[in-house]
Amino acid sequence: MATYESIAAAGQAIVGLLGDACPKPEFAGASFSLYQIKDFLSPMEEGLSLFLYRIAVNGSRRNLPPSVGADGRRYRSPIPLDLHYMLTAWGKTAEKQQLLLSWAIRMLQDVPVLHASLLNDYASDPATFRPGETIEIILDPLNLQDMSNLATLTKLNPPLSVTYVIRMVSVESKVALEEAELVQTRAFDLGKVRA
């Protein structure tokens, strides 16, 4: 289970992975960035932007059991989140835009599971994800209505984009569950019987 920094680390890892693997001769001037809504008003000239547009509680594993730390203490249950991203290609020409997005889709399909070592390389804290943890990147196309809503949110005509979801990022709690001592004996004091 990951710390609260896991959401930012997941986005940074995807952007970092794409930036590191980018074919340099073909896309030498490409930029790779996390975007906020305001960034869509003055986008980059060429590259890929990753916009986190929705965070939802995972419906299939909503109620996880309390977690146990390395010290044996129990902590409040982690919250499993699904992160919804829009990956957008920017280019000087339509062909460049399409080539860049096509390459990115293929790249993320080839590396659909990111391991803790890679995720922690791009995180601000190198212990954000525990060893053995992974996240899975899944292509998750939107229907026309949802794409229209997203375009309204970004205040643009729909840019050349594709949407992904990262499922089950479990954000752990730092609040320990206090446990009382075990009961050794029970005493029942029922009172006196009156005649």
Image: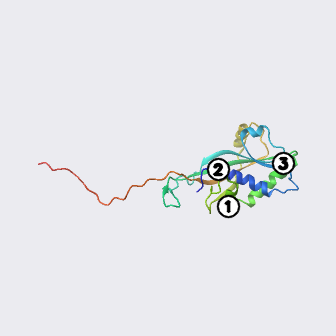
User: Quick one: 186 or 140, which is closer to the camera?
Assistant: 186
Badge 1 vs badge 2, beta-carbon distance below 8 Å: no
Circle 1 is placed at which residue position? 117
Query: Where residue 83 sits in the image (x, y, percent)?
Result: 65, 49
Instruction: Say which mark, if any, is on residue 7.
Output: 2
The residue drawn where x is 39% and y is 55% is: 180
The residue drawn where x is 63% and y is 50% is: 5
Amino acid at dot 1: Ser
Circle 3 is placed at which residue position? 97
Query: Where residue 119 sits in the image (x, y, percent)?
Result: 68, 57
Amino acid at dot 2: Ile
Tell me if mark 1 has few (under 14), some (14-19) or many (20+) residues whose alpha carbon lies within 10 angstroms of its own.
some
Earlier residue among tags 1 and 3: 3
Q: Quadrant of residue 36 in the image?
A: top right
Q: CA distance from mark 1 to mark 2?
A: 16 Å
Extreme residue toward the left, this view: 195
- The kind of secondary structure element at disc 3 is helix
Quadrant containing the N terminus in the rendered view: bottom right
Q: How many marks?
A: 3
Query: Where residue 91 sits in the image (x, y, percent)?
Result: 85, 46
Tell me if mark 3 has few (under 14), some (14-19) or many (20+) residues whose alpha carbon lies within 10 angstroms of its own.
many
Q: CA distance from mark 1 to mark 3?
A: 31 Å
Earlier residue among tags 1 and 2: 2
185 w.r.t. 144: above or below: below
Which of pointers 1 and 2 indicates the residue nearer the eye? 1
